[in-house]
Image (cartoon, rainbow, N blue to C red):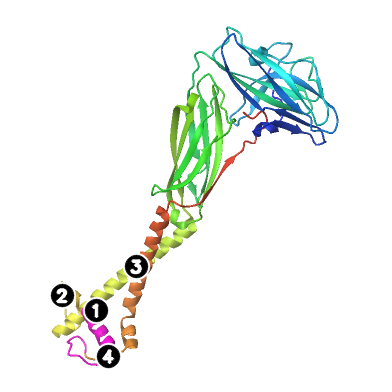
Amino acid sequence: MKMRALIVLLALLLPLGSGAQTQGALSVTVTPPLIQLTIGRGESWASSLKVVNTNPYDVTYYAQLMDFSADGEGGAASLTPIVGGASIGLASWVSIPSEPITVPPGSSADIPFTVNIPEGASPGGHYAAILIGTQPPEVNTSGTSVAVSTLVSSLLFVRIEGEVLERGRIREFRTERELYQTNEASFLLRFENTGNTHLIPRGLITIYNMWGKERGVLPINESSSFGNVLPQSIRKFEFSWKGDAELFDIGRYSAVATLSFGDGEKQSVSATTYFWVVPVVPVATLLGSLLLFILALVWFIRRYIRRALTLERERRGVSAGTEESTPSLASLAEPLREGVVDLRRVVRSEPSLPVSISTSPVTVTGFMTKYKLFFLFLALLIVGAVSGISYLQKSLDPNRSFEVRETASEQEGVVQ
């Protein structure tokens, strides 16, 4: 019967060996943590595990075989012990010594094992775990549980040659939410293995802002022997991304996941998801400022037109209450001509010139006071232009920093 062993194989996360330690001083170290083998039907393969005793006293170790299969989508596995010598998987084709091995302190010992593939074995992936413990396994009378103390494992991935099917697809790729108020997001990618052998999907998640500029690259299973997806199972990968806290990078983002898998990673799949980054308070402030800018711009234009009409009436000697037709282009230019004449009089210090528009003396202070609205309008235009240019520069800048992090699975069990 299948049972779920409550064992955390900590060392399977390490590249060079596997080890576990209880709350006391007793520890177990086994290498290698993962063995991958391609073999034909009817063939045999022999190797060994190295057990290292890092304790200051002699330790006796016991080896045990179990089949395992995927358990959930977090990379955990469900262990199936061999009860009464019966196994339906790879464990029945593996031979290990049944005698305990005692290792002196600071020394190591090899535990040999042999894989014998029968002629009728099905092509594809087969999986077992060689567990090394400090107490002999105790199976109760019902044969449904295994009692162990300190226990670590080396995983055995065997691919039998023949009609091997390497098939996979991205079952789901999305963000945790569609709208974020800061430049960060959490991604969930679910890869489904529809073939008959294990696959390690490797690739990248590339994040782009609304202008198509790259804002982050998240590697998937880069330079790792783990991250396997067993046949006919789904495995999820979780990532988090954090970009620069910039208001200018608001908008719709896209994330493109591209994965390669299979022998030589010749097969590939891709998926795209979208999300929005909209900081509500800063954006509301920006929109309010933009609205005020537009209202001020309209007000200044209306003031200018009224001034142009006033000058036209004065030139024609028409009273203010008389109806005036739509001003011509020449009349609309009158306020500009007046400003140019006043500026020349200030620069040349000429108190009186034969100008039809105005003959009163003009000083620098008087000029600034008379045209204060014009200078305010010009300042608003400059601020708007600088803001627009700054937005485009930062949005289109390809050199922006970001942080990426792979979220580890919280499930206990064998890590594939």
Q: Which residue is mark 1?
A: 307
| Residue 325 shows up from this direction | no
As drawn, 379 above or below 76: below
Closer to the eye: label 3 or 2: 2
Q: Quadrant of the C terminus?
A: top right
As drawn, 294 above or below 235: below
Is mark 3 in CB contact (under 8 Å) with mark 2? Answer: no
Asked where in the image residue 124 lies, by quadrant, the reply is: top right
Q: Which residue is mark 2?
A: 330
Query: Mark 4, residues whose alpha carbon is within 10 Å: few (<14), some, or many (≥20)?
Result: few
Q: Position of residue 74 (x, y in %)?
A: 60, 32
State the CA–CA distance, disc 3 to disc 4: 37 Å
Q: Position of residue 387 (x, y in %)?
A: 39, 63
Q: Magenta residues?
A: 335-358
- Kind of residue sitting beneath label 2: Ala
Residue at the front extreme?
A: 107
Label 1: element kind: helix
State the CA–CA distance, disc 4 to disc 1: 25 Å
Residue occupying the point 23% across, 77% down: 336
Label 3: element kind: helix
State the CA–CA distance, disc 2 to disc 4: 28 Å
User: Quick one: label 3 or label 2, which is nearer the N terminus?
Assistant: 3
